[in-house]
Amino acid sequence: MRGFGLKELIVVIAVLAVLIVVALFGLRSHGERAVRLQCQRNLQQVGSAMIAYTLAHDGLLPDSSPGNPLYGGGAWPWDINTNLFNELVRQGASTNSLYCPANPAMNDDVHRNFWRYAHNSMQVISYGMLFNGQSLVPSQYWRVNLLGSGGAPEQTELGFDATISMDGDFMHIRGFNTDRSNHVHGSDPVGGNILFEDGHVNWHDFKQMRDRFHTAGAVWYF
């Protein structure tokens, strides 16, 4: 029986290489889908907690205005008063649900403590929430009453993956490697999940997004 010649061996090696690449790509794609689905479930949990909160507060969403002694102080969309953080957990949102699994460095013991500030009265999470009174969010995006913004609830954003850039950089928003957009591959985001007022969550590819507003420091939100 004739053994493999050099040409046959090269063909076999090439086929194996292709199969390995396909397998790795499939594993990566599967992993990405799993992260997106977990992120979707996170935002759904947060949405359910929001609905539970409004049922106990005459339909009103939390007020992050600086003058609110209980929940105030939020400026950036992902700034959340520690009291409100704890309230959302009490209403059914787990601590983990407030952090995107695509940015795991935001949700470990070291960084959770790092992202507390103002004498621990504020906490940075990895989702943006459109609460009333956030000073670095244009007022047309503030949500005061659940289902009361005037737009169709299924088309009105309430929360979203942090999809942001600073001077065109999606990886270093304020100079820290962990403060970056979620779902980034390479140097650009591939998209993000969005929570709507009716409680459903949809994934949007980055090519479907557009810049909505910007704040101090050349930070853009998509």
Image (cartoon, rainbow, N blue to C red):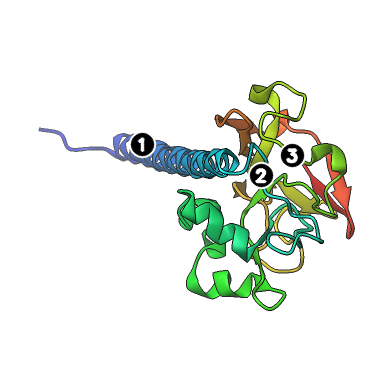
Give the numbered dot on residue 126: none
Q: Amino acid at mark 1?
A: Leu
CA gap, disc 1 and disc 2: 28 Å
Q: Amino acid at mark 3?
A: Arg
First in residue order: circle 3 vs circle 2: 3
Asked where in the image residue 208 lies, by quadrant, the reply is: top right
Relative to 43, residue 201 above or below: above
Tell which tag, 3 or 2, sits nearer the viewer.
3
* Position in image of residue 66 (x %, y %): 81, 61
Residue at 77% over, 46% down: 132
Q: Residue at the bottom extreme?
A: 119
Relative to 42, residue 18 above or below: above
Q: Which residue is mark 1?
A: 19
Q: Quadrant of the C terminus?
A: top right
The answer to which of 204 and 148 lies nearer the viewer is: 148
Q: Which residue is mark 3?
A: 143
Q: Quadrant of the N terminus?
A: top left
Q: Is residue 81 left or right of residue 109?
A: right
* Position in image of residue 202 (x %, y %): 58, 30
Q: Which residue is mark 2?
A: 189
Relative to 26, residue 181 above or below: below
CA gap, disc 3 and disc 2: 26 Å
* Position in image of residue 126 (x %, y %): 61, 55
Q: How crowded is the residue under tag 1: few (<14 C-alpha within 10 Å), some, or many (20+)?
A: few
CA gap, disc 3 and disc 1: 50 Å
Residue at 49% over, 49% down: 91
